Amino acid sequence: MVKVKKDQSTEEKILAAAKKVFVRSGMTGARMQDIADEAGINKAMLHYYFRNKEKLFEVIFREAAAKLFPKLNLVFESDLSLFEKIERFTVQYIDVILENPYLPLFVLNEIHRDPEAFLTHIWQRENMPRPEKFLDQIEREIKKGNIKRISPLQLLLNLISLCIFPFMARPMFQIHLGVDDLQFRNLMQQRKTEVPRFIIDAIRK
Amino acid sequence: MVKVKKDQSTEEKILAAAKKVFVRSGMTGARMQDIADEAGINKAMLHYYFRNKEKLFEVIFREAAAKLFPKLNLVFESDLSLFEKIERFTVQYIDVILENPYLPLFVLNEIHRDPEAFLTHIWQRENMPRPEKFLDQIEREIKKGNIKRISPLQLLLNLISLCIFPFMARPMFQIHLGVDDLQFRNLMQQRKTEVPRFIIDAIRK
DNA sequence: GTCTATAATTTGATAGAC
DNA sequence: GTCTATCAAATTATAGAC
C-alpha cells in the first residue's frame, strides 16, 4: 500500500512510512522492504538516509516516546487544584492518544523488549515524567482532610491506567463487544469527562 | 541460560522454554536457537515436535490467551452481588497476573500484530469473555437506585484497566519511580483491596 | 528420539551505474 | 539523490547418521 504526498521530501516520506510500519509491527517485526514500499521508494534509500535499521528505529521510537509524555509535566507541575489537574490530565492525554492510538502499546512493548537501549540512548531527561509535585499535592489534600485517605502512588496509577489502557486493549473490545472504529472513538471521547468524574467521586469525602 | 528440570519430558521442556522466550521477545523477535538453548536441547528437536516456528508459537499463544481470561467468566456469570463481583474479579485477576506479569503485554501485542490469526485459528469460544450478564447487572443496580448513573461499558473498562495496566507499564514505573521488584509486588498486592474500594467509592451513592 | 551438518530462505546492507 | 543488482549474515527448516 503506497500513499505518497508529492510535496514531501524523501526523508519525510521515509519517516512517515517507518513510523507506520514500526508502530504496527514493532522493531523486530518490521521489514526494511515494507518501509520502502510504504514510502514508495527504493530500499537502498533507507540506508542512504539513515544508515541502518537500528538508527531509523531510534528516530521513530524517540519521537513516539516523547509524544507519549510531554504535555503531562505541564499539568503535573502547574499550580492548578488537584481536581483540575485530574481533569486536564485526562483530557490532554486522551486527546493525544486519540491521534496516535497505537503509540502506548508500541512504546511499552519496545521498552519491555530492550530496557537497556531505552535507558542508555533513547530517553531524554526533559521528557521524563516528574510526578513528585502531583504526589505531594495529593498528600497535602489528604492531610487537609479534603479527600479520602489513599496512597498517592495508587491514585496516580489509577489515573494513568484509566486513560491509557482502553487504547491498548482496543482490538479485544472491538472483537468481543462488536465495537467499530467510530463507536470506539465516541467511547474515548466520553471518557474525557467520565474518568475525572469517576476518580473525583472515588476520592471526594 | 539453561535451566532444565530432569523429570520433564522433552516436549514439556520445549514448551516451557518457548513460553519464556516468546513472552519476552514476541513472535517476531524470538529465535528458534534461543528456545533450543533455553530448553537445553537441539534446535532440530523443535521441528521434530512442532514442525515449525508458527505452530509452536500458536500453542504458546493459545495457552497464554486462555490464561488471561478463563476464571473471569466464573465471576461474571455468578450470582454474586455487584460489589462482590468487583472484589472477586480484582483479586482473581491480579493474582493470575502476578504469576504471569508479562502475559498481558505479550497477548495484546500479538493480537495487534496479527488480528486475523487471532480470529481465525487461535481464539476459542469457551475462553471468550462474556460480560453481558455483568453489564445487565450494572444496569439493574442503576435502575434500582443502588449506585450512581454510569455507562456499564465504561465501568467495565475501568475495572479491567485498573487491574491490568499497571503490569504493562511496569518497566516505566520501575525506571521513573525507582520501584524494585519486591516493591512492585507489594503495590500490586495492595491493589487487590485498593481497586475495589476505589471503584465502589466511585459508584456508591 | 536425538544429534550434526547442511540446505533453503529471508532480510539487512552495500556496490556501482546513472 | 536514486535506482538495480548483488552480497553477506542471520535464521528457519530439513536430511540423514546413530
Image (cartoon, coloured by chain):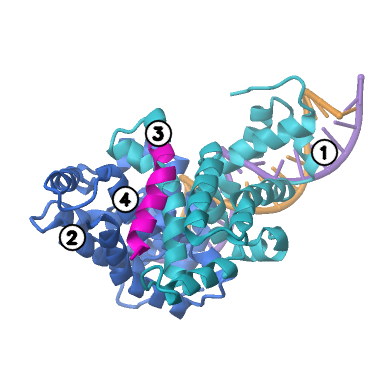
Chain colours: A cyan, B blue, C purple, D orange
Image x and y of residue B184, in percent:
44, 74
Q: Is residue B135 magenta?
A: no
Name the quarter where the N terminus of chain A is drawn: top right
Spatial distance from mark 2 to mark 3, Cα to Cα? Answer: 27 Å
Residue stretch in magenta = A186-205
Residue B62's tag is 4
Identity of the amino acid at label 3? Answer: Asn
- Residue under numbered circle 3: A186
Give the structural element (helix, strand or loop) at label 1. Answer: helix
Is residue A198 placed above or below B88 in the rendered structure?
above
Q: Is residue A14 left or right of residue A88?
A: right
Residue B83's tag is 2
Labels 1 and 3 within one chain: yes
Q: Is residue A192 magenta?
A: yes
Spatial distance from mark 3 to mark 4, Cα to Cα? Answer: 31 Å
Name the chain under label 2.
B
Image x and y of residue B192, in percent:
30, 70
**Sequence order check, earlier mark of 2 and 4:** 4
In front of the other: B33 or B145: B145
Labels 3 and 4 within one chain: no
